[in-house]
Amino acid sequence: MPHLEFGTAQPCPTPMKLRASNPESLQRAIAETGAVIKYRFPWWLRPFLLRGVAGITLGRRIYIEGANPESILRHELVHVRQIQRLGLVRFYWTYIREYAANLRGGLSSAEAYRRISLEEEAFAAECREIL
Ligand SMILES: [Zn+2]
């Protein structure tokens, strides 16, 4: 079950922009998680992709495309860590349960997605220096 990332990463606010670019921290997070990074989506997934998908995480494999690849990479690395921490079943269970609860609470689908605790943690990492 792939984890799809919708929308494009927003540019970080100016003071955070410079701090966010920390290749050593990024390399360390990649090494620690054992993540495999691909800068194109796989051809066999393309027919299933909706418009606006910016990143896909399949276990430890991360596919990214589009603008702000570093922000998306930081975001997806957080999901790889979450999956390693929680296990695949708990990750998706938490994800779907919170998304459904947010929708029931009256949020739009875009807002319901951003308010999932696993997403809030990943969005916060996009502009943080140390992953
Ligand atoms: Zn995400």
Image (tube, rainbow, N blue to C red):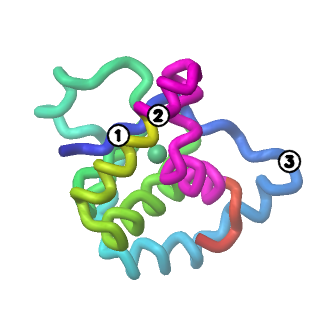
What secondary structure is marked by label 1?
A: helix
What secondary structure is marked by label 2?
A: helix
Residue 71 appears left or right of 59: right
In this rendered view, identify the residue nearer to me: 15 or 85: 85
- Per the rendering, the mark at residue 96 is 1
- Per the rendering, the mark at residue 14 is 3
Q: Which sits earlier in the primary sequence, circle 1 or circle 2?
A: 1
Q: Residue at x 65, y 69 (%)?
A: 22
The picture places residue 50, in percent across and down from the top left corner, at: 32, 20
- Per the rendering, the mark at residue 72 is none
Residue 55 appears left or right of 104: left
| Residue 106 in magenta stretch | yes
Q: Residue at x 41, y 72 (%)?
A: 30
CA neighbours of label 2 inside 10 A, class few (<14), some (14 to 19), many (20+): few
The picture places residue 55, in percent across and down from the top left corner, at: 39, 41
Q: Residue at x 53, y 70 (%)?
A: 26
The picture places residue 111, in percent across and down from the top left corner, at: 58, 28
